[in-house]
Image (cartoon, grey):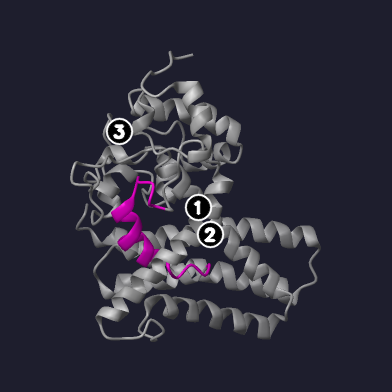
Amino acid sequence: MAGDNYYRILCILSVPLFWIGFISTALLVGTQELPWWSILALVVGVGTINGGCLTTGHELGHKHSPIDRFFAKLACAVCGYAHFCIEHNRGHHVWVSTPEDPASSRMGETIYHFATRELPGTFRRGWEQEALRMSKRGKSAWSFENDILQGYAITIAVAAVLIAVGGWVVLPFIVAHHFFGWYGLTQANYVEHYGLLRQKRANGRYEAVEPRHSWNTNHIFSNLITFHLQRHSDHHANPQRPYQSLRDFPDLPRLPSGYPGMYLLAAIPPLWFRVMDKKVMEWAKGDLTKVNVHEPALGKLTAAYGTTTLPLAA
């Protein structure tokens, strides 16, 4: 399956669909007199669906083909997240499941606190990585060869045309649409590595990334709509493996639901903690020192779980 070009073409063809959905909805908002609740529904609906553009960008952005990388850039530009592929490949995959990674959530951290750390943290790291690449080539970080600047130029150019055609009423729609796209990625990042920690070796370096450092789920429908992003354990262990050939194994850290269900659970932190904290402690064999912990919650978690004792199952 890894060599079947059909699956790659599906990814590429999804990119114009995201653009069509975004542009047509923005023009609808700008050219029609719609009630506020209708605009709100369009923002939430189309913004949530178009969050999937980053899933497509994620898959294509891992490839070496210039064509794939070009469509990854177009995909991320749909919701104005041009730094994603740079940060994800050169940052997240290097530092995943460590306290240094802004895209890895910590046990005891709500998704809302995580968003305040992840959104600016990943942008900053993406820019630093691309500026470093430009520096090594003897170029300024503000050179138009900067992939991040290219992506944001596409986003801004399309927004300018939409505002020129539909008026300034389109601008709040665009901003809200993009935010929902960003938050869709935040939700995925939050559930994918919650509490999981790679251990430091005696030389101060972290152990290699293994399938056990990502939460996995193998629900059919949610896997299909996310290009198998939910088989995340195999993806991080083998980043170049195409989505259609990612594998599932019975001994992987297992989420109790597909991503949509986990997103709903994460939206209610007390329920999330009740379900997931026990699973994290089971993964760590009861040793809180082997967990990526949100420092402000350390006292509460220590009182609940101790440091080395796994509580009895309810």
Please, what is the three-letter code of the amino acid marked with disc 1?
A: Thr
* Residue, disc 1: 186
Q: Closer to the N terminus: mark 2 or mark 3?
A: 2
Q: Are marks 3 and 1 in contact (CB under 8 Å)?
A: no
Q: Label 1's element?
A: helix
Indicate the position of residue 6 as horizontal and vertical percent values.
29, 60
Q: Are marks 2 and 1 in contact (CB under 8 Å)?
A: yes
Give the residue drawn at x 26%, y 34%: 249
How many callouts does the rendering have? 3
Q: Is residue 92 in the magenta section?
A: yes
Bounds of the magenta segment: 79-101
Please tell me how crowded label 2 is: few (under 14), some (14-19), or many (20+) other residues with Cα within 10 Å.
many
Q: Is residue 237 visible?
A: yes
Image quarter for residue 65? Answer: bottom left
Q: Closer to the N terminus: mark 3 or mark 1?
A: 1
Q: Are marks 2 and 3 in contact (CB under 8 Å)?
A: no
CA–CA distance between discs 2 and 1?
A: 6 Å
Indicate the position of residue 256 as horizontal and vertical percent values.
45, 30
CA–CA distance between discs 3 and 1?
A: 22 Å
Please tell me how crowded label 1 is: few (under 14), some (14-19), or many (20+) other residues with Cα within 10 Å.
many
Q: In the image, is 157 to the left or to the right of 89? A: right
Image quarter for residue 11? Answer: bottom left
Q: Label 2's element?
A: helix
CA–CA distance between discs 2 and 3?
A: 28 Å
Depth order, front residue of 287/49: 287
* Residue, disc 2: 182
* Residue, disc 3: 252
Q: Is residue 20 in the magenta section?
A: no
**Closer to the observer: label 3 or label 1?**
1
